[in-house]
Image: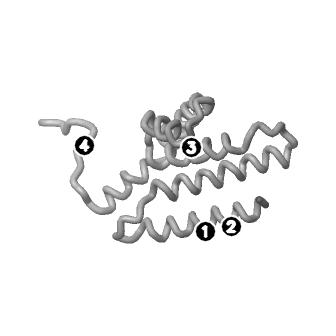
Amino acid sequence: MPISDIIIYLVVWYTLTIITYGVWVPAGLFLPGILIGCSVGIIYFDIIYYGLGAENIGGQSYIIIGATAMLAGYCRMTYSLAVIMLETTQSINNFLPTLLTIGVSLSVARACNRSLYDYAIRAKQMPLLRNHVPEVN
């Protein structure tokens, strides 16, 4: 599949996800996150494989790693995401790269901003428990 088709697919899903995120309809963010991550992973694979002439080690691994990085970045999922990806793909060979991807993605995401779900909870003004005990005078 040409890389231009994958980029169009990525842009369409990204745009539709942004539009449905702002409405009060439970449209979901998990599956669009997987699809966007898969397309980013395959674009990265195409750039590495065709652009730099690297060995063909399988585009499926890049797809799985891309989806894992996307979900870990905005959902802040950890071990549960690794188990979900392992059960979905039935590939034990991708488990350690998946754990490494989750660690790197979480570190970068925590340095940049809060979780997407944290933003949604605060935007809807839902009551939340604090992370620390308030000071008493």
- Amino acid at pointer 2: Ile
Q: Residues within 10 Å of mark 1 (few under 14, many from 20)?
A: few
Q: Nearer the viewer, residue 51 or 86?
A: 86
Q: CA distance from mark 4 to mark 1?
A: 37 Å
Q: CA distance from mark 1 to mark 3?
A: 20 Å
Residue denoted by label 3: 69
Residue denoted by label 1: 12
Residue extending furthest right?
A: 53
| Place of residue 111 in the rendered image (x, y in percent of width and height, measured from the top left) | 50, 41
Who's the residue at 58% across and 28% down the image?
A: 96
Q: Residues within 10 Å of mark 4 (few under 14, many from 20)?
A: few
Residue 89 can be seen in this image: yes
| Place of residue 51 in the rendered image (x, y in percent of width and height, measured from the top left) | 85, 48
Who's the residue at 38% across and 55% down the image?
A: 119
Badge 2 vs badge 3, beta-carbon distance below 8 Å: no
- Amino acid at pointer 1: Val
Kindly state the secondary structure of the residue where label 1 is placed. helix
Marks 4 and 1: which is nearer the front? 1
Who's the residue at 13% across and 36% down the image?
A: 136
Q: Which mark is residue 52?
A: none
Residue denoted by label 2: 8
Q: CA distance from mark 3 to mark 4?
A: 27 Å
Q: CA distance from mark 1 to mark 2?
A: 6 Å
- Amino acid at pointer 4: Arg
